[in-house]
Image: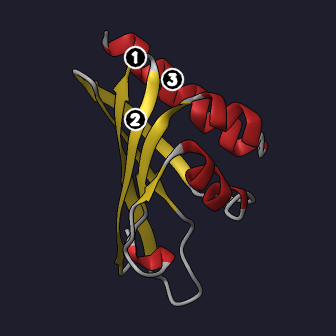
């Protein structure tokens, strides 16, 4: 199971970096939930593929460097980090996915700003 859950997240990440909303959408369950980090604005949870894809459509563009993708059962964790800002701070985080039936059922984003490496 772990290989299959990692593969769907890797397909999602590749589609995201291509800016391919249709391919991103194909990785999501119809009733997917998305909880962005607080730096994305008010901490709200979006529900449903259409609502989540509308939010994602505004987020494509240059993104963070992705790190390791790891799984435990139906949970997948993907590390990421942005290059240092002018003040030397670094935004780093993890995306935590729930994969069910070969599709992403939930994506939660957790992040922090650090004073560099």
Quick check: 92 above or below 79?
below
Mark 1 to mark 3 CA distance (whole Å): 10 Å
Whichever of callouts 1 and 3 sits on the residue coming sooner in the sequence is: 3
Residue located at (59% from left, 33% from top): 12
Whichever of callouts 2 and 3 sits on the residue coming sooner in the sequence is: 3
Q: Which mark is residue 101?
A: 1
Quick check: 37 above or below 107?
below
Q: Residue furthest bottom?
A: 87
Q: Are marks 1 and 2 in contact (CB under 8 Å)?
A: yes
The x and y percentages for residue 117 are: 37, 68
The x and y percentages for residue 31 are: 45, 39
State how many labels appear. Answer: 3
Image quadrant containing the N terminus: top left
Left or right position of 17 against 7: right
Q: Which mark is residue 110?
A: none
Q: Which mark is residue 105?
A: 2
Mark 2 to mark 3 CA distance (whole Å): 11 Å
The part of the image, by quadrant, that contains residue 43 is bottom left
Residue located at (64% from left, 36% from top): 25
Residue bearing the label numbered 3: 8
Residue located at (77% from left, 46% from top): 19
The part of the image, by quadrant, that contains residue 44 is bottom left
Mark 1 to mark 2 CA distance (whole Å): 9 Å
- Residue at disc 1, secondary structure: loop
> Which mark's residue is nearer the viewer, 2 or 3?
2
- Residue at disc 3, secondary structure: helix
Mark 1 neighbour density, 10 Å: few (under 14) some (14–19) many (20 or more): few
């Amino acid at each position: 199971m772990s290989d299959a859950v990692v593969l769907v997240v890797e397909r999602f990440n590749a589609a995201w970096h291509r800016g391919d909303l249709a391919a991103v959408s194909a990785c999501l369950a119809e009733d997917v939930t998305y909880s962005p980090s607080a730096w994305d604005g008010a901490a709200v949870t979006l529900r449903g593929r259409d609502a989540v894809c509308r939010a994602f459509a505004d987020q494509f563009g240059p993104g963070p460097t992705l790190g390791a993708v790891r799984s435990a059962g139906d949970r997948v964790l993907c590390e990421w980090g942005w290059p240092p800002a002018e003040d030397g701070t670094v935004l780093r985080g993890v995306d935590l996915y729930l994969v069910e039936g070969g599709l992403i059922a939930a994506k939660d984003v957790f992040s922090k700003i650090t004073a560099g490496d």
